[in-house]
Image (cartoon, rainbow, N blue to C red):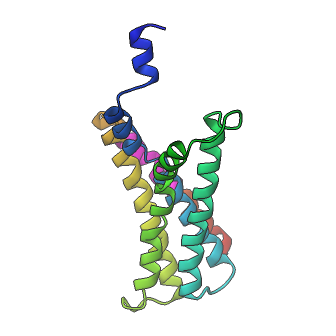
């Protein structure tokens, strides 16, 4: 393998850290997951706020574990003894799945202070989740050095995905 090939296969630690920090895939996915949890919970009737907050955070945690597991086996660790440094790196990289559940959970938690009823709380949290999804995609695009046009496309695609989830909520309620 050439020096350039080795450098591409094993980038310097700073470049690898920057690339890992720029990977907000879990944030986009986690926001869409949170929106789906809110829609699902809302279709089953009124959900107490504490239950919805816990459901959002626990679902984010379970999917984080699933992502860590998938990444570890995706890196070929099924054939090799796992290294704890790799485990911790993957745990950190996938943590955005959980982080994405926090803003909608906070929206649910503060909704009584805002005087929101159960239905309005669900819409508020759902809007926060969709906004988060768009925000994560824009952050990822910008961090990756994408041009303005690609950033806008990324935001639009994620907005449409969020609107599909919103449409599901409307459709399931009627």
**In the image, 153: left or right of 121?**
left
> Where does residue 113 sit, x and y in percent of width and height?
37, 91
Quarter location, residue 102: bottom left
Which portion, as a residue range, is magenta?
151-162
Residue at position x 52%, y 42% in the image: 86
Q: Position of residue 77 (x, y in %)?
A: 65, 37
Asked if 107 appears above or below 160 in the picture, the reply is below
Quadrant (top left/top right/bottom left/bottom right) for the C terminus: bottom right
User: Which residue appears at 56% of the width and 64% of the height?
Assistant: 60
Can the viewer see residue 115 in this picture?
Answer: yes
Give the answer, above or below, for where 137 lies relative to 167.
above
Residue sitting nearer the eye, 24 or 72 = 72
Q: Give the residue displayed 67% in from the left and 84% down from the top.
A: 45
Above or below residue 132? Residue 17 is above
**Where 120 falls versus 85 (above or below)?**
below
Seen at 56% across and 78% down, the residue is 54
Image mark count: 0
The dominant secondary structure in magenta is helix
Q: Is residue 3 left or right of residue 163?
A: left
Q: Along the line of sight, which residue is nearer the eye, 95 or 38?
A: 95
């Amino acid at each position: 393998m050439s020096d350039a090939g080795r450098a591409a296969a094993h980038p310097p630690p700073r470049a690898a850290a920057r690339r890992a920090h720029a990977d907000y895939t879990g944030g986009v996915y986690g926001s869409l997951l949170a929106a789906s949890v809110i829609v699902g919970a809302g279709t089953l009737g009124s959900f107490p706020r504490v239950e919805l907050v816990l459901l959002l955070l626990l679902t984010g945690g379970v999917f984080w574990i699933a992502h860590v597991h998938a990444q570890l086996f995706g890196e070929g660790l099924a054939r090799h003894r796992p290294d704890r440094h790799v485990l911790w790196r993957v745990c950190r990289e996938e943590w955005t799945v959980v982080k994405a559940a926090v803003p909608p959970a906070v929206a649910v938690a503060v909704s009584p202070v805002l005087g929101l009823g159960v239905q309005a709380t669900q819409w508020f949290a759902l809007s926060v989740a969709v906004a988060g999804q768009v925000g994560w995609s824009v952050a990822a695009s910008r961090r990756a050095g994408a041009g303005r046009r690609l950033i806008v496309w990324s935001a639009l695609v994620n907005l449409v995905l969020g609107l599909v989830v919103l449409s599901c909520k409307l459709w399931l309620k009627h």
